[in-house]
Image: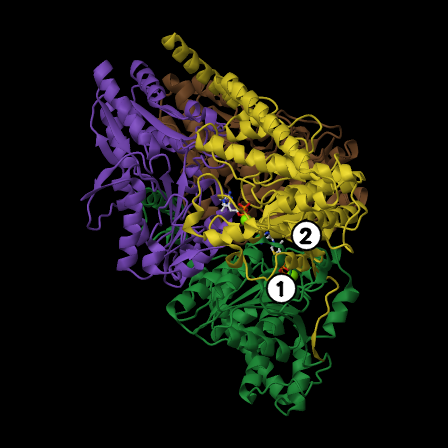
Chain colours: A brown, B purple, C yellow, D green
Amino acid sequence: MAKMTMVQALNHALHQQMRKDDSVVVLGEDVGVDGGVFRVTDGLIDEFGKERVIDTPLAESAIVGTSIGMAIYGLKPVGEIQFSGFSYLAFHQLESHAARMRWRSQGGYHVPMVLRMPYAGGVRALEHHSESREAYYAHTPGLKMVIPSGPRTARALLVSAIQDPDPVIFFEPKSVYRAFREEVPEEEESMPLGQAQVVREGGDITLIAYGAMLRPTLEAAQRLEDEDGVQAEVIDLLTISPLDTDTFAESVRKTGRAVVVHEAPRSFGPGAEVVSRLVEKSFWYLEAPIQRVTGFDIIIPMFAYEQVYLPGVERILRGARETLNA
Amino acid sequence: MAKMTMVQALNHALHQQMRKDDSVVVLGEDVGVDGGVFRVTDGLIDEFGKERVIDTPLAESAIVGTSIGMAIYGLKPVGEIQFSGFSYLAFHQLESHAARMRWRSQGGYHVPMVLRMPYAGGVRALEHHSESREAYYAHTPGLKMVIPSGPRTARALLVSAIQDPDPVIFFEPKSVYRAFREEVPEEEESMPLGQAQVVREGGDITLIAYGAMLRPTLEAAQRLEDEDGVQAEVIDLLTISPLDTDTFAESVRKTGRAVVVHEAPRSFGPGAEVVSRLVEKSFWYLEAPIQRVTGFDIIIPMFAYEQVYLPGVERILRGARETLNA
Amino acid sequence: MPREKIDLPHHVEYLSILDKDGNVDQDLEPDIPDDQLRKLHRYMLLGRRFDERMLRLQRQGRIGTFAPIKGQEASQIGPVAALREDDWMVPAFREAGAMIWRGQSMEGILLLYGGFNQAGEMPEGINNLPVAVPVGTQVLHAVGLGYGMKYRGDDRVAMTFFGDGATSEGDFHEGLNFAGVFQTPVVFVCQNNHWAISIPRSHQTRSETLAQKALAYGMPGIQVDGNDILATYVAATEAVERARSGGGPTLIECVTYRRSVHTTADDPTRYRTDEEVAEWEERDPITRFQKYLKDKGLLSDQELEELEEEIDTEIRDAVEKTEKRMEELAGEAMVMFEHMYAELPPYLREQRDELARELAAKEGSNG
Amino acid sequence: MPREKIDLPHHVEYLSILDKDGNVDQDLEPDIPDDQLRKLHRYMLLGRRFDERMLRLQRQGRIGTFAPIKGQEASQIGPVAALREDDWMVPAFREAGAMIWRGQSMEGILLLYGGFNQAGEMPEGINNLPVAVPVGTQVLHAVGLGYGMKYRGDDRVAMTFFGDGATSEGDFHEGLNFAGVFQTPVVFVCQNNHWAISIPRSHQTRSETLAQKALAYGMPGIQVDGNDILATYVAATEAVERARSGGGPTLIECVTYRRSVHTTADDPTRYRTDEEVAEWEERDPITRFQKYLKDKGLLSDQELEELEEEIDTEIRDAVEKTEKRMEELAGEAMVMFEHMYAELPPYLREQRDELARELAAKEGSNG
Ligand SMILES: Cc1ncc(C[n+]2csc(CCOP(=O)(O)OP(=O)(O)O)c2C)c(N)n1
Ligand SMILES: Cc1ncc(C[n+]2csc(CCOP(=O)(O)OP(=O)(O)O)c2C)c(N)n1
Ligand SMILES: [Mg+2]
Ligand SMILES: [Mg+2]
């Protein structure tokens, strides 16, 4: 066991999977010699060479489109898009091909690729470097959409994503990259995709979060206990699609109250799906309207104001208290 | 007043707006000489010439990207994407520029463009020609997302979209294109964007639909009356974003029950937002879980099975009855 | 400190071997075994006849929209004839001829245009990707396949097809650029059939040829008479050999003509003249090749008649088989939930069950 | 029925006028008025000094990430100097020099990199688009502006900048192709600074020059010494004049070098050698031009010293003013809801009020 940041944990997963399986290749802009702009792919090129750790020209659609071809040929490409805000240049390759090849060929071909990308705010970056638009991918049949919340889940989920036979969009919350360390075992560890985790138990209210929002949500839960004597259950979704309905629906059947937290814009965002599934699965248990504590439906501001935009402990607390008092 | 199909009504709107305002230009693949593959732009090139009715090379990103430049220069481009399933090739231009120019320039520049495209199923077409992914655009801050349901709303909304100072994504339900005719006045008629319509009044349940789903929904409402003696209120959303919450929230405060209907995949789809806003605005009035009667979370099948995939009168009826009996 | 012209190492060539009357340029005539020549002819003819039949089926409402190949037979069969079976072929949507040469069945193609999910199944051992509808996007998949081949040290080649219109798409550009940089074994075959629906080639791009676009990627480009199967075959063979031996990618522009509708939803009289079409009828790739074969003593009128009959029967069988299959499959709508993922996630199992109950109820109420 | 080389009407040129020691090729020397020569020098120097200051500000945490221009001054100021005020300029993200020449303020640029929405405001009457971060995507906007100019019959030109890396993106391709087809008055300026973050030019594409990519679009392409402001100015002036007079678009490749970090988040020692950087220091565009001006008697050591001081003061003032402005703006987070649409829709008004209440509450609890 070693204490690792999320960057180190991801790097560890890549090293380990590449050692184990020579069909795993890494590609993207600056992933090789430079080791990735966040250093997630650091050192890979030294160990595995430039045929396996591929510095590509600057073209997102090509990164995804060639990954699809490689994957059909039997490789397991792990592509990187430098920031999720640039993944839209490859959107058609994801929607129209990665997500459809298995279906289109009726199982004849499949696309075991992972597309990693840093997403979300909090690092004082330029425009397009702070967006959270996981809903685009979650709404796309044929894709899986995964977002870890810390070093350990990041490592374990990346391992599962690489081993998954279908295309996985893997969002990495960049504000968590180096924010804290966790114990990460040396041996390979994976976690099933499509499974949420109850990370804090409680019977009074359910707080549902993922990615960088997990930590402020946990902090809010602690403050609810300390300041209000309220026991909040906190659920880390981990996979946005396929969404693990059972875990949160069950929790809300117990608590009767729920708040869903994300950085993404509220309207047509991931929270809406969580709310809808709760209405479908746990309606008769609801004691209050489910709250969405989310980003606003605007472009995330330039960094001088991003902390005001991002949901933080206070906003989550307020949402929870309103729900508790409703 | 003349009886027009949706294609004729849209064509009429384009003729009229182009006559009125020489900043309106039309561009896209095959929109000129060919008059558009569905003939929506038929005859425009004869009247307005090829500088204003622009047959472009085959490149969606360029259609959108050059429209942005034209719009900034003071034109009002009405672009056409031949099928909504090909709009993803331009997704980055829409998300990263069309939606952001006003904001980025703090009001200095704006992008009064319309991007029209046929969407949705029901016409026995090839792969990628039948999708409903309005949620992608509705979730994108800075865009408006409009979907008419018949000839008259199509004409009036297209007029408003062209006159709107901001970028509007305009989805045309292709199965409605020639399905029926409506009286359309000769004089210019517009309808405010962002406003839903109550198209049938009733006090027992609210059915919320849009686009091609409006007609089967109305038929289901009639059958509810005939067969169950139930009065269904039917709301035509017309604009998906900005979503007119008030109209449906108020209706549900009256009826206590709601079903939302769309062809798009269910998960993370437009219905989820409707459900969430109802939870936020009308929770205490809800007498049953809100149902989503929608496309499944799969790729819309090839046309031999598309009618099984698409929500039809029966499925809507079943959803409504379950909601009524819940 | 000059102002000077830059010399480029690559240049662009034009190749034609059989003229429009079927006379051969003896200096350039390739040495192709007789059997192979007969096979080329057979598949061109089959492609033509199958196309005609599909058009009738479509007009009768028995299949949906499809993209006819008439006039382009040499542009697609010449190139794939240069491939080995274990090479890969990545089509657009107008390559029925190439697909059949490469081992796909007419039944499969009919089923596809009949609107059945099940058409996606590729016969065992056939290295073809399925039809790609979004124009130009498939080019990148060929580059990825090529990367895989190179990575694995397999001496294979990926060949991809696309139209003149496709060269305007960003993915065409990104694909050729990647192939150039990584020197992947890919042959890019552009079927320049002069039209992209209603947009003429001259309006698609201002470059004089499409072949010269290769210069932008530091790769060789060649323009060939796409109605001359000897030329398309020779150009492709050179490109395939270069790719296979590590020499990198090539762009081939086959200059041909779409003589039929764009798809069956299209009305070409809106945008082009009958004279233009008639002009290209005179350059028919099949008649021309038949003249060549006849001159070589490889085809007699009687042989041709027999071949036509054989093909006719083959097509009739395929149509019959497919129509039977379509009937069988008509009730199997539940297949739409298959092959979405290796394993259906819980929410999709629920939706599948939802639909199954709905269909069962309908069945019940009908029965 | 030949196999022959195709002659292309366009060819690709290379242009250089001042050599690296500042000696001029007299045959090619343009006739530029003295004032204009001084102005070119002033803005290059200002660009350099402002860049240096921004780097320090960033290191001190007073602004965020930005992209330095050091070494590329001639590549961007030469081209914009060929524009008229009413022409349009469409930058990428590494054109601070060009932006200032075109009338944007240093305050605005500092505010942008300070992370303030309000930086987006363009000074009245300046026809520049804002910085475009997604690589290559802005190229299309210039083509659209050009279309508008042509449509309106305005004798204007749109000039867009992008890097060597940007030439790999699909939008570069689609943009040049549209410009070729519609013959829009656009000048495409590629600042080939040899690196796209860690990817060297040689790995970005296999084409020998970037200028030759023009051939794919049937437009003229020219490669110039991008550290020679006379060459960049001359090439741009020719291209601008051609565009303005209806002669269509041009691709200009300015061969230069990014001597600093890619952005302040980058560590170039990971991917390139100090020697390479040192080599390019010797080809500095400013020193070279100073030599030329001195030879022409347009710049003395004393004048240079005075100019440096003047610039220093200007920059200091701009920094001071901006820092004051930043303090003022720090509390104005509500601006984030502005300019999303011409009119804020109801749900956004609600969200704005939500945030306003939150901020008021915080204010209250702090106060
Ligand atoms: C990305 C995309 N845009 C638009 C279409 C609609 N469409 C289908 S075929 C076609 C023209 C294709 O022209 P070309 O590439 O020359 O191929 P051809 O049809 O001539 O074989 C168009 C516009 C599409 N299928 N994909
Ligand atoms: C579409 C897109 N992909 C990736 C990035 C991240 N990125 C920013 S600049 C850059 C390199 C750009 O290289 P080049 O075009 O040569 O311009 P330069 O930075 O050298 O001025 C990259 C990869 C981006 N901004 N946009
Ligand atoms: Mg074509
Ligand atoms: Mg560069």
Q: Among all residues in the image, which is located at the extreme left?
A: B1
A48 or D159, which is in the foreground? D159
Q: Are marks 2 and 1 in contact (CB under 8 Å)?
A: no
SS at mark 2 in the image: strand
The chain ID associated with circle 2 is: C
Q: Quadrant of ligand 4?
A: bottom right
Quarter of the figure that contains the N terminus of chain C: bottom right
| Left or right, residue A64 beside residue D323 | right
| Left or right, residue B187 beside residue C281 | left
B175 or B207, which is in the foreground? B175
Instruction: Say which amino acid is labelled 2.
Output: Leu
SS at mark 1 in the image: helix
Mark 2 closeness class: few <14, some 14–19, many ≥20 residues within 10 Å: many
Residue C198 placed where, x, y %? 46, 50
> Is label 1's Cβ within 8 Å of ligand 1?
no
> Is label 2's Cβ within 8 Å of ligand 1?
no
Residue pictured at 63% horizontal, 53% vertical: C20
Mark 1 closeness class: few <14, some 14–19, many ≥20 residues within 10 Å: many
Q: Which mark is residue D215?
A: 1
Residue C61 visible in the snapshot: yes
* Residue position marked by numbered label 2 in the rendering: C251
